[in-house]
Image: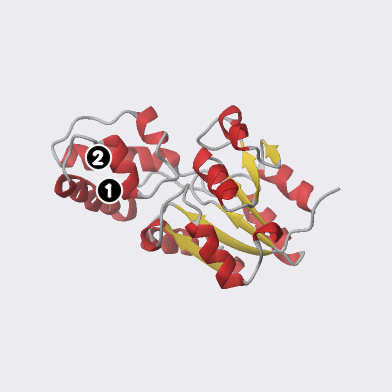
């Protein structure tokens, strides 16, 4: 039988918003602007879900902290102001979130985005009022450390056994496992479902409406 959850916690990039292409292009442009070697699409996609600092530590291990900080600053400029690659919500997300909200689910966001990036995305997508709590990588520890989830649980006064994490990367599903929380893996984002199953999600889905049908 379906377990009753009081709180649904969503990853953002790759789970609610189709933004991987923009993230890839902005990282590549930032590295190029800073005179560094070209970063491959695949290497960047493997880091989506981490905070920018953690992502760049993996992407540019031979670059010093000052150099990576310069790339991070330029990346944010590209993502927020210069790059115009569309970042729509995935099919069914807008209607699905509204339906879950109307059914009484409390919802939150746990993301590798920065606070300024998430606030811009919430405003652009018109979904900000649907979430009772949000936590970003520049405010706490990056995934897969569970602190982000612990802070959301403390803020909402919900126990880990009463919450569900939904994400598209191994970082999301591992974070949930580290927090003692159930999870759902979505297969339309960045990582393959075979990789996500390693951390034993409760359910794997291929579309957002499939998740909503399971919950409702």
| The furthest residue to the right | 1
Q: What residue is rendered at 19% in x and 37% in y?
A: 32
Label 1 Cα crowd, 10 Å radius (few <14 / some 14-19 / many 20+): many
Horizontal side of residue 210 vs 135, given as left or right: right
Say which quarter of the image contains residue 167. Answer: top right
**In front here: 94 or 171?**
171
Residue occupied by mark 2 = 29
Label 2 Cα crowd, 10 Å radius (few <14 / some 14-19 / many 20+): many
> Is 62 located above or below residue 16 in the figure?
above
**Helix, strand or loop under label 2:** helix
Could you tell me residue 91's position as x and y percent?
62, 44
Badge number at residue 75:
1
> Is 163 located above or below residue 68 in the figure?
below
Q: What residue is rendered at 69% in x and 54% in y?
A: 96
Could you tell me residue 42's position as x and y percent?
39, 28
Q: What residue is rendered at 60% in x and 31% in y?
A: 193
Could you tell me residue 81's position as x and y percent?
30, 55
Q: Say how many tags the image has.
A: 2
Horizontal side of residue 119 vs 11, given as left or right: left
Horizontal side of residue 70 vs 187, given as left or right: left
**Helix, strand or loop under label 1:** helix
Q: Are marks 2 and 1 in contact (CB under 8 Å)?
A: yes
Q: What residue is rendered at 30% in x and 49% in y?
A: 53
Image quarter of the C terminus? bottom right
Query: Disc 2 or 1, which lies upstream in sequence?
Result: 2
């Amino acid at each position: 039988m379906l377990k009753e959850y009081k709180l649904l916690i969503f990853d953002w990039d790759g789970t609610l918003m189709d933004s991987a292409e923009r993230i890839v292009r902005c990282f590549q442009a930032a590295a190029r602007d800073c005179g560094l070697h070209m970063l491959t699409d695949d290497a960047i996609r493997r880091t989506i879900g981490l905070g920018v600092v953690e992502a760049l530590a993996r992407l540019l291990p031979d670059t010093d902290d000052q150099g990576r900080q310069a790339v991070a600053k330029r990346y944010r400029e590209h993502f927020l102001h210069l790059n115009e690659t569309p970042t729509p919500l995935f099919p069914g997300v807008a209607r699905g979130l509204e339906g879950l909200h109307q059914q009484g689910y409390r919802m939150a966001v746990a993301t590798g985005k920065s606070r300024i990036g998430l606030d811009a995305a919430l405003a652009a997508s018109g979904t900000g009022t649907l979430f009772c709590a949000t936590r970003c990588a520049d405010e706490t520890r990056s995934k897969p450390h569970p602190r982000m989830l612990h802070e959301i649980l403390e803020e909402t006064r919900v126990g880990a056994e009463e919450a569900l994490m939904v994400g598209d990367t191994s970082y999301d599903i591992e974070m949930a496992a580290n927090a003692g929380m159930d999870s759902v893996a979505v297969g339309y984002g960045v990582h393959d479902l075979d990789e996500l199953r390693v951390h034993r999600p409760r359910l794997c889905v291929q579309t957002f409406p499939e998740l909503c049908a399971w919950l409702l």
